[in-house]
Image (spheres, helix red, strand yellow):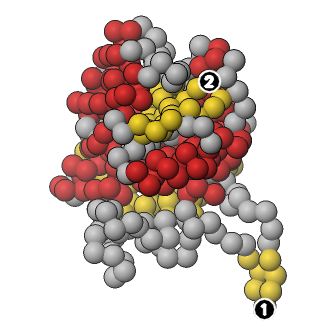
Amino acid sequence: MTIKVGLIGAGVMGADHARILTTAVSGAELVAVSDPAPERRSNIVEMCGSVRAFLDPMDLIQDRSVDAVLVASPDETHGTLVLACLAIGKPVLCEKPLAPSVAECLKVIEAERALGKRLVTIGYMRRFDPGYVEMKRKFDERELGAALVMHCIHRNATAPSFMTAPMLITNSAVHEIDIARFVLGREVRRVTVITPRKTGLAKMQDPQILLLEMDDGVVVDAEIFSNAQYGYDVRAELVCEKGTIALTPPHDVTVKHSAHEGFPFPGDWRPRFAPAYRAELQAWTAGIGKGVPVGASAWDGYVATAVADAGLRSLASGRPTEIELEPRPVLYG
Ligand code: ISE
């Protein structure tokens, strides 16, 4: 069975998803694209062949030839598009965040709960990254004892012009929030945002440090630095009672030249997480065929937004901020 996918949003991430779906995922086919910009729509058609182009994303969602929808449009459109998919019972993979506001996330949870089945997957692709998957597997063996601290680093070479200080939390740190919950299997109960001296190379508060206090006492510190200049660099080390588990920087070769030894950094997250994006799309489309939901759920999307929202309040107040979650519906286990 081939899953026919419709893509909403053909920007940087949407185009990358289209390329991966067409070249690296089996049992799936990109059949439709929607984007307000005609040149972006035609890029996808050129790259992927027989793909129908739609101006209105709602028409794509309704179209009978589309089995499942991939949402990669701007963050503020996510909630409405996901709700439209749920209204007609179509599976949807929505790029992070599920929605910028907690209230909108809760509407999605309510709609899915009313349907009684999971149709929403959130694109927290790190859950499919071989390094994080191995970190979780090793930790779950419990040979290293209890987790104590998790150190995370999230550096972008340069931030796009639309990036703001709050977006370091809602756009970048949400990945750290989600992966900490995924690896540790615990919820965040308090968040504090610390603002170090800021770089002279950006106008906004950059970098920021998020301190996440988990409900079992583990502390996660995450440095978010969106103008680090030298490349895209994501690191993590989980410190346990009897040892640590760290990601190794993924690179194919080490080069020795001119009295230096080193390896290159990617320019952004697409090459760094290419295996994760591929595995995510493969698992999502295969899961639809089998009726098995995979990846981060709408609940995970809601929690990441709720923690980020508390982070925004901490950024504004400078104080630790408690997180109060709604009761978890049985649908989400
Ligand atoms: C971007 O939107 C992403 O999702 C990337 O994975 C992340 O590393 C980057 O910081 C975000 O801006």
Tell whether label 2 touches label 1 (CB within 8 Å). Answer: no
Q: Quadrant of residue 111?
A: top left
Q: Residue at x 44, y 55 (%)?
A: 39
Q: Secondary structure at mark 1?
A: loop
Q: Can see residue 302? A: no
Q: Quadrant of residue 283?
A: top right
Q: Can see residue 65? A: yes
Residue type, label 1: Ser
Residue furthest to the left in view is 317
Q: Identify the residue under disc 1.
A: 258
Is 166 located above or below residue 6 in the figure?
Answer: below
Q: Identify the residue under disc 2.
A: 3
Q: 10 Å neighbourhood of mark 1: few (<14), some, or many (≥20)? A: few
Q: Residue at x 58, y 26 (%)?
A: 4
Considering depth in this image, is 145 or 47 the residue closer to the camera? 47
Q: 10 Å neighbourhood of mark 2: few (<14), some, or many (≥20)? A: many
Q: Residue at x 19, y 56 (%)?
A: 316
Q: Secondary structure at mark 2?
A: strand
Considering depth in this image, is 54 or 216 the residue closer to the camera? 54
Q: Position of residue 113 (x, y in %)?
A: 36, 12
Q: Position of residue 16 (x, y in %)?
A: 57, 50
Residue at mark 2: C-beta within 8 A of ligand 1: no
